Amino acid sequence: MINLKGRLQKVASMVDHCKKPADIGTDHAYLPIYLVQSGICPMAIATDIKKGPLRKAEKNIIRYHMQDKIELRLGDGLIPIKDDGCDVLIIAGMGGVLIRDIIEKSIDTAKKAKHIVMQPMYAEEALREFLLRYGFKIIEESLAKHEGKIYPVIKGAYDGIVREEDIFHLYIGRRLFEQRDPLLKEFLRKRIKRQDRVVQGMSKSLRMKEAHIKENSLLIDMKKAYDEITW
């Protein structure tokens, strides 16, 4: 049995029982192997835009005797699985802007999925803003710690309802507060340090006065939220 840790384990925990998930940008194919082994799904598709990662994935699929259950496909984003009935999509280990672009490029395929599990490495605010604006509901969100860093894992599904969100909760997901995520305070502490550097970098430029006010307001909101967390 393959053993997942950190962010991959958190991603896998958000995948409900399904018929055929697709792991986009699979790399080593650890996620689809785990999902089939654990009985979460009977089969899976693993894709990547490059041949190198797919060769690594193929070695692992053979190693765990999954050749008849996991299909490898070469291609960009969701294009290789178009109209193939994949009920769950997994897009993990990429920047939030890239995940956004992958979904936008194949929006009809994304809308058909029962849910999408996304794990942005950075720029998660761009991904959240896109999801809400294009009618995707954020069902669940959690934080995963991996090699000293903390990453958000977002589970969403299309329901056609366009939503707006304040700037603070685009950067720090609202669901993290509602679900009282145990890593939230530590995550906020790290984000406050990063945001403070952004604000300090803008403070000396008159040309960035408006942007400085916006970023400083976000920093104040982060500090306030940090102080209010009691769990």
Image (cartoon, rainbow, N blue to C red):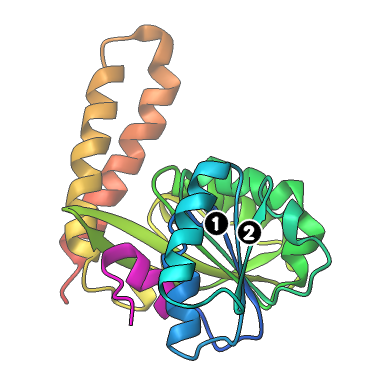
Nearer to us in this view, 91 or 71: 71
The local crowd at label 1, few if under 14, some if 14 to 19, many if 20 or more residues have their Cα within 10 Å, is few
Nearer to us in this view, 58 or 35: 58
- Three-letter amino acid code of the residue under disc 1: Glu
Image quadrant in which you'd find residue 78: bottom right
Circle nearer the N terminus (2, 1): 2
Quadrant housing the C terminus: bottom left
Q: Is residue 65 above or below residue 89?
A: below
The local crowd at label 2, few if under 14, some if 14 to 19, many if 20 or more residues have their Cα within 10 Å, is many
Mark 2 vs mark 1: give the one in front.
2
Q: Mark 1 points at which residue?
A: 165
Q: In this view, does 22 lie above or below 36?
A: above
Secondary element at tag 1: loop
Q: Residue at x 31, y 49 (%)?
A: 221
Quadrant housing the N terminus: bottom left
Q: Residue at x 24, y 37 (%)?
A: 194
Q: Is the magenta stretch mostly helix, strand or loop?
A: helix
Label 2 and label 1: CA atoms lie apart by: 8 Å
Nearer to us in this view, 93 or 221: 93
The answer to whether the residue labelled 2 contacts the one labelled 1, judged by CB atoms less than 8 Å apart, is yes
Q: In this view, does 52 lie above or below 11?
A: above
Q: Which residues are drawn in magenta? A: 1-13
Q: Name the residue under label 2.
A: 132
| 19 part of magenta stretch | no
- Three-letter amino acid code of the residue under disc 2: Leu
Nearer to us in this view, 71 or 38: 71
Q: Which residue is drawn at 68% across and 78% down?
A: 114
- Is residue 84 rendered to the left or right of residue 187? right
Q: Residue at x 44, y 22 (%)?
A: 210
| 6 part of magenta stretch | yes
